[in-house]
Image (cartoon, helix red, strand yellow):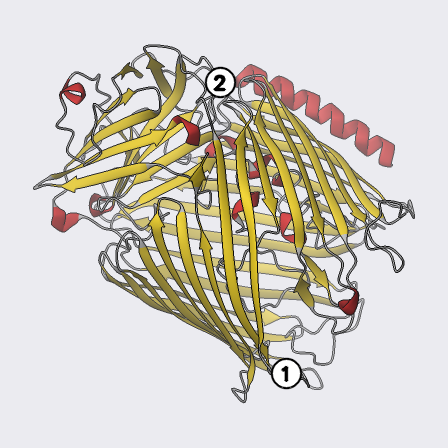
């Protein structure tokens, strides 16, 4: 059976390759070409005015087209863009018409703003013209900067966690605002000698609920889609920056106190380390880290957990972010052979808790070799801790990606976790404790993005060499403005357990068909679109027994004023293959092998996001295993523009199960204050009350960006037992980082 499945899998891959090649059509770009003129160094001052003579002589990109709410008409708020460059910088000037200062919407002065809650101007660069990977730089009308990496052709949006050094200023006038940006070529990866990039310029105007772009992007795609770009042509070939080495040293001091241990007393520590970024070429980068410290990273948001499986939290640590897709996007979201958050954590065998473990060093080579090839190599070493029973480990990930056809690629990955310490030796590679994955992925994207897909096969190798150490899946989607249909199937072996991956569920075969139908009313003053979704997910175990069947019919309305609502009805069947407490409160567990068919409904809404006061919420009710569940969730937000916001989010779940099983009332509350005193000084404070895990968390983070990409952080964390408000632990960290160009 396994051989037959592999045969079908690779046959399907070949068929899809042919389809992807045949059906893609070249996008129309004849009228979307912009010449970037070269200027003398020092001829532009970044002040948001565009009053230098060289700007008046620059070519203009204009005639922006709507992406939303319609994609067949010119933008109501028009934009003009000019591009210049010298030896060290690329300069972008933009005039954003059609907005008075009273109509501007921004969430705060904090860097890396969300495009959903802010007016914006963005520039996308596809420097290798592969339609897959790119860079994004943007600002809002208050000059707040945002930079990000675009992967998978922009289908997954932009990763704004990436940070780099560049400059921008904005001026706001009576009925328009002006952008002036200077981006060092050192901050962008590109081919040495390039004479053209693919590019697009994007505009968001929340007051009129409009998104627009220089090159038209169909409204069924993300506006950042790299399938729709124009040509940015340079007067002279671009040259690799002469020196491109960055050192980012840090110093930390910390205070920690654990009130749950028998021993009392505070622990004071100091630490130092550094990151280095070395550009081996204009497109290939070497990242190094020594004794890294991630104490400034914001803590994860707590959730009420009713799942039978592990919850996923995204990577936030800066070292792992550039070219993260090259390492992290193998497999599916819940079948990942590599998940970087596994590095630097381990189980304390004394307490049984998951704790941080020191990383000695990390090295990561990543980037483009040429237009068709990308490579990635990562190696990290953690330190053993004998007192907690934690062994040292070495992590190696190697990835290579080859572009095929217009925008598709084939990628291979090798992941190795190797234990490097024993009771007798603190460091040795001479152990037989390893966990290795070898995998092959085919990522499909047609030229116009109508067809998207992924097909992969991964094999796990361990000393035990057990049967069922494999995973394979196939996903194919067809996307048109009014119709979207997708097919997915997965086959995960019972012993496919990559220890450096994220695979919360194994030993199953899954089918996941999905369809969406969209209606765009032509003359409605209130409704921008209607969406009707039909989603299914079916699981079978390795013996062919059905374990899960989930079906959902959902209706969504998006209003012209940014508000929205949706209603869903569901049918769910579960056959438990291990005993489980549905409340996750350590109550009596439902027995293995028991079966449940349930029906439920859900309603959600959000009000106008442009208003200073807005809210969203929802309610769901229905059967839940052998009982019933009522869930109410919502958030209340007040924005005091442009300095920040205050919000209160909450989640209440009442589970009623028959005796002798636990019933429960689960409450999760999260008040949050987000303040930006200036574009360089930010304070975030939030409280998380979670009675399911009996915890109250208080977290405050003050950040002062005293120079570009150089910061001082003060982070305070406190945890209490939720029921008695008895203190668990407390920590205070002060960290300073400095970006130094060498």
Disc 2 to disc 1: CB gap under 8 Å:
no
Left or right: 384, with 225 as reference point: right
Percent position (x, y) of residue 12? 71, 26
Q: Earlier in the sequence, mark 2 or mark 1?
A: 2
Q: Tell me where residue 605 sits by quadrant.
A: bottom left
**Can I make out residue 692 in this image?**
yes
Name the residue rendered at 56%, 51% in the picture.
Answer: 273
Question: Outermost residue toward the left?
Answer: 174
Q: Which mark is residue 191?
A: 2
Name the residue rendered at 28%, 55% in the picture.
Answer: 108
Left or right: 453, with 296 as reference point: right
Name the residue rendered at 18%, 22% in the picture.
Answer: 55
Q: Which mark is residue 260?
A: 1
Q: Which mark is residue 518?
A: none
Question: Outermost residue toward the bottom?
Answer: 724
- Mark 1: which secondary structure? loop
| Alpha carbon separation for disc pair 2 and 1 | 56 Å
Q: Residues within 10 Å of mark 2 (few under 14, many from 20)?
A: many
320 or 573: nearer the viewer: 320
Name the residue rendered at 36%, 44% in the picture.
Answer: 708
688 or 622: nearer the viewer: 688
Q: Residues within 10 Å of mark 1 (few under 14, many from 20)?
A: few
Q: Tell me where residue 610 sits by quadrant.
A: bottom left
Left or right: 109, with 254 as reference point: left
Q: Measured along the vertical axis of the image, is residue 163 above or below residue 640?
A: above
Percent position (x, y) of residue 309? 68, 61
Percent position (x, y) of residue 35? 29, 14
**Can I make out residue 224 in this image?**
no
């Amino acid at each position: 059976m396994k051989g037959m499945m592999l045969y079908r899998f690779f046959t399907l891959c070949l068929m899809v390759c042919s389809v992807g090649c045949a059906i893609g059509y070249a996008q129309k770009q004849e009228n979307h070409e912009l010449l970037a003129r070269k200027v003398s160094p020092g001829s532009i001052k970044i002040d948001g005015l565009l009053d230098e003579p060289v700007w008046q002589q620059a070519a203009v990109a204009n005639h922006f087209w709507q992406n939303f709410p319609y994609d067949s008409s010119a933008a109501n708020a028009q934009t003009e863009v000019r591009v210049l460059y010298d030896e060290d910088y690329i300069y972008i000037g933009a005039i954003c018409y059609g907005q008075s200062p009273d109509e501007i919407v921004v969430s705060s002065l904090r860097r890396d703003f969300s495009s959903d809650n802010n007016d914006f101007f963005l520039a996308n660069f596809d420097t290798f013209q592969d339609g897959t990977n790119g860079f994004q730089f943007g600002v809002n009308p208050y000059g707040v900067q945002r930079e990000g990496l675009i992967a998978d052709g922009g289908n997954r949006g932009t990763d704004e966690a990436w940070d780099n050094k560049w400059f921008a200023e904005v001026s706001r006038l009576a009925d328009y605002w002006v952008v002036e940006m200077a981006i060092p070529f050192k901050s962008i990866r590109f081919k040495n000698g390039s004479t053209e990039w693919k590019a697009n310029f994007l505009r968001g105007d929340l007051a009129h609920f409009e998104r627009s772009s220089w090159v038209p992007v169909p409204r069924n795609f993300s506006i950042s889609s790299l399938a729709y770009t124009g040509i940015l042509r340079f007067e002279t070939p671009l040259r690799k920056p002469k020196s491109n080495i960055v050192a980012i040293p840090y110093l930390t001091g910390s205070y920690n106190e654990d009130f749950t241990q028998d021993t009392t007393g505070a622990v004071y520590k100091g630490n130092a380390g550094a990151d280095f970024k070395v550009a081996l070429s204009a497109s290939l980068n070497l990242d190094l880290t020594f004794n890294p410290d991630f104490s400034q990273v914001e803590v994860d948001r707590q959730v009420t957990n009713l799942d039978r499986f592990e919850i996923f939290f995204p990577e936030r640590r800066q070292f792992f972010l550039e070219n993260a897709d090259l390492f992290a996007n193998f497999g599916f979201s819940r079948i990942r052979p590599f998940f970087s958050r596994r590095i630097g954590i381990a189980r304390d065998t004394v307490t049984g808790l998951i704790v941080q473990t020191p990383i000695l060093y990390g090295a990561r080579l990543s980037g483009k070799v040429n237009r068709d090839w990308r490579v990635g190599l990562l190696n990290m070493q953690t330190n053993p801790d004998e007192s907690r029973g934690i062994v040292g480990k070495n992590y190696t990930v190697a990835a290579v990606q080859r572009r095929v056809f217009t925008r598709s690629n084939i990628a291979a990955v090798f992941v190795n976790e190797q234990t490097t310490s024993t009771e007798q030796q603190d460091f040795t590679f001479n152990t037989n404790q390893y966990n290795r994955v070898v995998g092959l992925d085919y990522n499909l994207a047609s030229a116009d993005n109508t067809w998207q897909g992924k097909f992969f096969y991964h094999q796990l190798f361990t000393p035990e060499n057990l049967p069922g150490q494999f995973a394979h899946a196939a996903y194919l989607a067809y996307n048109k403005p009014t119709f979207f249909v997708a097919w997915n199937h997965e086959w995960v072996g019972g012993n496919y357990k990559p220890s450096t991956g994220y695979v919360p569920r194994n030993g199953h075969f899954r089918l996941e068909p999905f369809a969406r139908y969209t209606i765009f009313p032509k003359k409605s003053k209130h409704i921008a679109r209607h969406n009707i979704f039909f989603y299914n997910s079916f699981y079978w175990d390795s013996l062919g027994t059905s374990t899960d069947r989930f079906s959902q019919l959902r209706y969504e309305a998006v209003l012209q004023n940014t508000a929205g609502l949706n209603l869903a009805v569901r049918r769910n069947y579960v056959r438990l293959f291990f005993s489980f407490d549905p409340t996750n409160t350590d109550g009596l567990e439902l027995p293995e092998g028991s079966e449940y068919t349930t029906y439920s409904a859900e309603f959600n809404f959000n009000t106008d996001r442009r208003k200073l006061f807005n809210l969203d919420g929802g309610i769901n009710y229905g059967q839940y295993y052998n009982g019933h569940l009522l869930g109410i969730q919502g958030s209340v937000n007040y924005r005091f523009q442009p300095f920040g916001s205050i919000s209160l989010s909450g989640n209440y779940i009442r589970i009623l199960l028959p005796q002798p099983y636990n019933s429960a009332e689960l409450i999760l509350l999260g008040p949050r204050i987000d303040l930006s005193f200036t574009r360089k000084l930010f304070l975030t404070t939030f409280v998380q009350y979670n009675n399911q895990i009996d915890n109250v968390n208080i977290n405050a983070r003050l950040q002062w960006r005293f120079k570009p990409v150089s910061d001082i952080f003060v982070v305070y964390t406190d945890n209490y037992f939720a029921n008695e408000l008895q203190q668990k632990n407390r920590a205070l960290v002060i960290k300073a980082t400095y970006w130094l160009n060498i």
